[in-house]
Image (cartoon, helix red, strand yellow):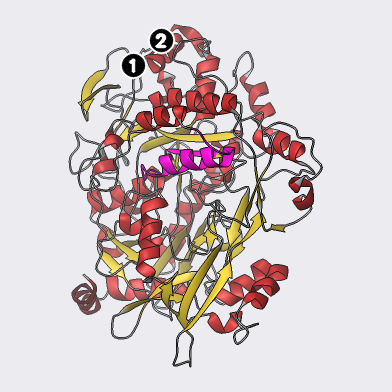
Amino acid sequence: MASWHTLLLLASLPLVACYDPCSVISDRKWVQYYPLFLINSTVKDNILDVVNKTLQFHTSTNYQVSAPPPFDSQVHEDLIADINRMSVSRYPSEFAFHLDLFQTFRRVNDGDLSLFSSYQHAAWISFIPLPLVLLTDKEGVQHVHIAPEAYNVSKREFKEELEFWENVLPSDMKGGLKSLSGAEVLLIDHQDPWAAINWNAENTGGYQSFATRQNSFFSSYSRYTSWQYVMGNFAQHVHPVTDTVTLTVLRHGRKKPETFTLPYRSRISYGTREFNSSSTYYEANCRARPATNGINFYPSVESALSTLDALGPRQESKFEQQPKLTFSQTFGHPMNVMLDATPLSDMDLPRESQPQAKPLKESYDVAQFYLLEDGETGVLALGSFSASDFNWFGKALLSGLRKLKELGAEKLVVDVTNNGGGYICIAHYLHRIIIGPKDSTEPQAGLDTTARASHLARSIVREISKGGDPSNVLLYNPSQWRNATHHSFPNATNWLKDVHEIEINGRKDAFSQRLGQECQPFEQFDTPDEALFDAKNVVIVSNGRCASSCSLFSITMAKEEGVRTVVVGGRADTQQQYCGVVGGQSTNFFTVDTEIKSTGLETHPDAPPDFMANIVQGITWRLGFGIDDPETPEEWQDHPATYNMPLTVENVNRPERIWKDVAGWAFNHKEEKKFQTQFE
């Protein structure tokens, strides 16, 4: 456990003490220690009870006990057994308990299934001003480097704190942070860098693929409402569990390696509420908030939504890999978005690294359109499948792609780097408009799905079928869904009455009938009569960190249409996966709890109580059926990238240069063959 980050307090309730560490750090942006509270057994038992009962709605609980190939070596976590273990375990602090809980859920390597204590997780985020990258030299050999842009990023982002790090460097390097940019990293904590990279891959979670979790160690970029810089898991930690790091590097122009040690520093997170003492910190940040637990939508759905919107962005939005959305902005739109351990970056990508080409005026929010210099390659940089306005978003995608065609583009690069998903129907719609009308896009441009049929879930549907949801707004309402032939369920249908019982890893489970597509016809949007681009002229590029609705789009494009996929910057001898967990639809405890309360089932014996603490729990609510094997979940099927493209000092974290390199390899047959021979 970290020594300079942490300080144990005396209780988990308001304190009276001569020395109050929270009062000392309350007005500081950067801190050297982290407040801890003694474990409150009542709160601990409550959290485990809620989490355990919410898992009955998670589709993959029994699958994740021992995942099928190709992820059998990556996913083997029995969460029910883990919860039983934690219930009898003794912890020295709340932080120790929540760290165990967090790490346990991360081991399932499923970004849709996550559990975060908002007051223990990412309340302070620890940084070091040396983001790393994996670069390939001219001989094709890969080495770990400090990112060439490291100093420019840190100077802008850390400002007043940069002097601290400058001054703790050894005397012969003091004030020399700038000279470390681009240096080769020979050792991390006296070991080969891959020891640290692989340790991160074993512990970071979020993605089934070991290769993708390796990639998360390194810095990258994202496109949300602006171009942003992602520090990577080496340079940014969400828990204060590491004090320092010792690096051995070879700086440019130097012949001898140099070794130095730098401390991590913790900065208060934007989601942490103001406090001036231990008691006010606990009250403001630790206790359940108004939107932690679900609500009863009735008697007035409109009033309920108005109340929720007044609270601002949804509580889980701190961890969702998409722009922050209100309840009204997501209401009525099926979502599939991962919850990531690292909150969305708010660091700017250095201006010199950003695309120099001007985006088309048809660009909107997370979707930016560019025409490359060759005049025939268009680019859609898509940072999320969510935006602030669902209707404008869909219309912008079509108008931007049409404009690219009008300008002469015949080839398309879709960059989904660090895209954590979003609106399911936007993923369906983008597939449909790029490829055009055909059997793989109409009426289903996504995946058929199934929901888990626990006793409580069946009770919810039964109450709805008896008129328990008169405004037809609940997730389990039959009006939201269609059967396997893509026909809407009649009103009052108990669609969970007849369930499919199966055995998974020796455990009995039950799922709903097969559910068809939920998005078409696209009444809000135009649907072209012809394909906008030929599938063989489309390439999807990312760093492998494409999840949920992004996975849905990439998988259907790759497997149904033959679109090629490129992962950039992965280890050359490791098969890269072009996406993460696809699920079918994600949701969260708040939504499930709202279903329970709105149907009057909060006293059902299987119903979870309210959280007493400020907790966010995400689950996979629907599971998508596979394409290659349509009788088993797509979640457990292989998604190997077509190419693993190396990053070099010339293109690393420079989106426009990456697009040009991808286009040069993917659309030039000679270069493509050369590329396949060298890197596959």
User: Magenta span has 108?
Assistant: yes
Q: Relative to residue 7, is residue 523 drawn left or right?
A: left
Instruction: Check disc 1 and report its element: helix, strand or loop.
Output: loop
Mark 1 or mark 2: which comes first in sequence? 2
> Are circles 1 and 2 on residues that touch, CB within 8 Å?
yes
- Residue 396 placement (x, y as % from top left): 51, 52
Query: Residue at label 2?
Result: 462
Quadrant assignment for the C terminus: bottom left
Amino acid type shown at disc 2: Arg
Residue 327 falls in which quadrant of the image?
top right
Point out which mark residue 496 bears.
1
Examine the rendering and report whether any part of residue 195 can be seen: yes
- Residue 383 placement (x, y as % from top left): 48, 56
* Figure check: 314 above or below 463: below
> What is the spatial separation of the Cα atoms under label 1 and label 2, in whole angstroms?
8 Å
Q: Relative to residue 97, is residue 282 drawn left or right?
A: right
Q: Relative to residue 658, is residue 312 drawn left or right?
A: right
The region drawn magenta spans 90-116
Neighbor class of circle 1 (other Cα within 10 Å; few <14, some 14-19, many 20+) is many
- Residue 170 placement (x, y as % from top left): 60, 81
